[in-house]
Image (cartoon, grey):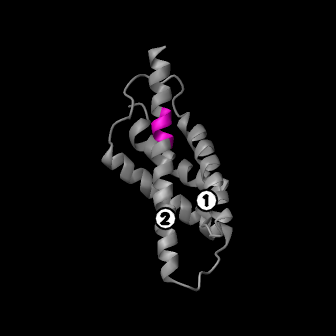
Amino acid sequence: MAELLAELLGFVLEILGEFVLQVIFELATEALAGLVHDRKQHSRAVSAIGLVFVGAAAGLLSAWRFPNRLIATRVVLPGASLLLAPIATGVAMHFLGRRLRLLERQPSSLVTFWGGALFAFSMALVRWWLVGLPR
């Protein structure tokens, strides 16, 4: 039972960490976009490539800053964060994007379900590859 609770806590901490990073990234993107008044719309493919690149960079930074697993106990389902974290983060970013649109702001592609999920997946994949793989 303790292992399951530890795994659940690790999962929640990972989702919260990814969500906080994405909110910071969205705020930074909005601040930079405010400097450039003529905001160009990019294609979805360009946005997806950018989100994968930035998510992988965030995963590298996360693995560098926290080189060990967040929860050191044995994991029941290794790699579950590769599926669950992107879904949860995508849902959270979808609701954040909807809130920004209600405030009549123009959110980036990060605050969509697919943008948040893609960012979270690439971050989780890099982190899992560097920290979580059994050695």
> Most extreme residue toward the bottom, as rendered?
38
Residue at numbered disc 1: 111
Above or below residue 110? Residue 46 is below
Q: Which residue is at 48% across, 82% downward?
A: 35
Q: Which residue is at 52% across, 83% downward?
A: 36
Above or below residue 9? Residue 38 is below
Q: Residue 96 location in percent, x, y?
A: 61, 55
**Quadrant position of residue 38:** bottom right
Q: Secondary structure at mark 2?
A: helix
Q: Residue 19 location in percent, x, y?
A: 51, 49
Q: Label 1 sits on what residue type?
A: Val
**Which residue is more in the foreground, 31 or 22?**
31
Most common secondary structure along the magenta stretch: helix
**Which residue is more in the foreground, 63 or 20?**
20
Which circle's residue, 2 or 1, is located before the other in the chain? 2
Magenta-tinted stretch: 11-15
Residue at numbered disc 2: 27
The disc placed on residue 49 is none
> Most extreme residue toward the top, as rendered?
1
Q: Secondary structure at mark 1?
A: helix
Above or below residue 58? Residue 105 is below
71 to the left or right of 18: left
26 to the left or right of 61: right
Above or below residue 29? Residue 130 is above
Categorize mark 1 by other alpha carbons within 10 Å: few (<14), some (14-19), many (20+): many
Categorize mark 2 by other alpha carbons within 10 Å: few (<14), some (14-19), many (20+): some
